[in-house]
Amino acid sequence: MAPPGPSLPRTGAFALSLFAKPARRQYVIGMTPRRLIDLPGIADLEFKAVMKRDYAEPEARLENPELDEASRTLFKLTADEAEALPRPADWDDIETRPIPAQVAAFEDAGWDVTDSKRRPMRILGHFNQQLWLAIRGVAGVLPFQADEPEPDPWASSLAAQAKRFQKR
């Protein structure tokens, strides 16, 4: 069967592939990006921002101390402290760029800062400066992440056997 060309109608699976969303970027073979929403307390804060839009605004830090508490717990730095820190001479002011540009830059740095629907998190503005400073080693710390367990050779061999069985 010939591959679909310009003379063939665009129907079926080929037509659907034209509108498919691009797959997530892979950084290192077998490694997945760290997700901001998976850090302790961030999912709850994001839920509050979804339910109340004002929670995502920069002024919300004054009315909601839990934002600074989460920031200090995770990065050992609050947003106000991060804002006041002097930047290195070669700093590119990435934290002031539009959020979509920052999302792509975070992905390049190995962080996923989107929600489950791949939209930028509403509370990203409260944590982007601290995260950039910690990623680049200027100030603060990155939250601890346990090493991924070694793949179990028995499980992978079982999966290979199941695949061979399905081919029969």
Image (cartoon, helix red, strand yellow):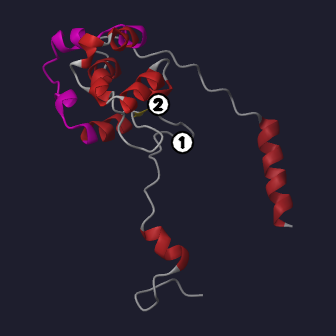
Is residue 66 positioned above or below 21 on the image? above
Query: Which residue corresponds to mark 1?
Result: 29
Q: Residue at x 42, y 92 (%)?
A: 7
Mark 1 surroundings: few (<14), some (14-19) or many (≥20) residues within 10 A: few
Q: Is residue 19 left or right of residue 160?
A: left
Report helix, strand or loop for mark 2: strand
Give the percent coordinates (x, y) of residue 131: 33, 21
- The N terminus appears in which quarter of the rendering? bottom right
- The C terminus appears in which quarter of the rendering? bottom right
- Residue 82 lies in the magenta stretch: yes
Q: Quadrant of residue 59?
A: top left
Report helix, strand or loop for mark 1: loop
Give the percent coordinates (x, y) of residue 152: 76, 33
Give the percent coordinates (x, y) of residue 13: 54, 74
Q: Please state the extent of the stretch shown in magenta in the rendering.
A: 71-100
Q: Is residue 165 left or right of residue 50?
A: right
Tell me the amino acid under the disc marked 2.
Arg
